[in-house]
Amino acid sequence: MRRRSGSGSDDAIYYAGWLFADLMLAAAIIFLVAIPATEAAPPTATPTGTPTVVTHAAAESTLTQTPMPTMTRTPTFTSTPTPTPTPSVTPTPTTVCLPRVIPRRVVFDVPGEGPGVASEARIRSTLGPLLPTGAVAGIVYSYGHAEKPEVGKRYATEFNQRVQLVFPAVFLPEGQTIYQALRFENTNRASAGDVNLDVYFLETSCR
């Protein structure tokens, strides 16, 4: 080692530096020696696959045979017959037939016989040709001729009864045809028993 020239203090620093470096080197060696050696782990053996021998019979038993799909026949649709519409019945208009009074007065004069009203034969011969065809008497006003009022009314009542017997289809019974027995004062005795009729006929009017 080459000795450096200089003062004593510089030499001391110089030797101290080398001493410190030697100590550090010795400490490093001791540290390395103190670390135990790590054994290398043995390599992991890779497992070797053992081949499996599959026989033909085992292979057949292992394989599951998938059944073939069964064909389903497509259903044939039967066409539904179209219903025949029921013909609608056209309603027949209802004909309403109502009786009504003819707006006119029909006057008949029936002469009497003797001191009384006409017989059934005279009533038939007198009124028969004059009655409207198919007519029905609705209201009948009978005026009996006589000198006294009560006698004239009696003549009118008798006439109403006889005319119903002669023409029952025209002069209906009391209640269906309205009868009014009235008197006509007449001082002429030759006219006693004559009857004047005011008849309002009913006819059938359909609409």
Image (cartoon, rainbow, N blue to C red):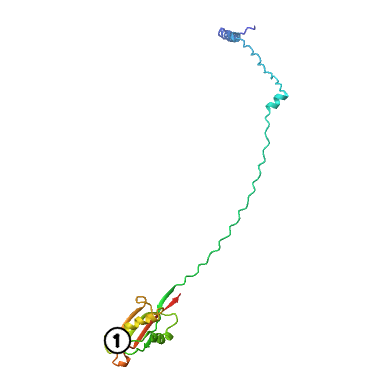
The residue positioned 33% from the left and 83% from the top of the image is 158
Q: Viewed as shown, does residue 38 lie left or right of 182? A: right
The residue positioned 27% from the left and 85% from the top of the image is 150
Pick the quarter of the image with the N terminus. Answer: top right
**Residue 163 on image: x %, y %:** 37, 82
Using the image, determine if residue 192 lies above or below residue 174: below
Category of crowding for the residue at label 1, using alpha-carbon neighbours closer than 10 angstroms: few (below 14), some (14–19), many (at least 20): many
Number of numbered discs:
1
Using the image, determine if residue 108 lies above or below residue 4: below
Quadrant position of residue 155: bottom left
Using the image, determine if residue 35 lies above or below residue 90: above
Depth order, front residue of 15/155: 155
Amino acid at pointer 1: Gly
**Residue 27 on image: x %, y %:** 58, 9
Depth order, front residue of 3/193: 193
Residue placed under numbered mark 1 in the picture: 152
Using the image, determine if residue 136 lies above or below residue 146: above
Q: Viewed as shown, does residue 207 lie left or right of 6? A: left
Depth order, front residue of 182/33: 182
The residue positioned 41% from the left and 87% from the top of the image is 125
Quadrant position of residue 160: bottom left
Q: Residue furthest right?
A: 56
**Residue 96 on image: x %, y %:** 44, 72
Judged from the image, the secondary structure of the residue bearing numbered disc 1 is helix
Quadrant position of residue 23: top right
**Residue 84 on image: x %, y %:** 58, 59
Pick the quarter of the image with the C terminus. Answer: bottom left
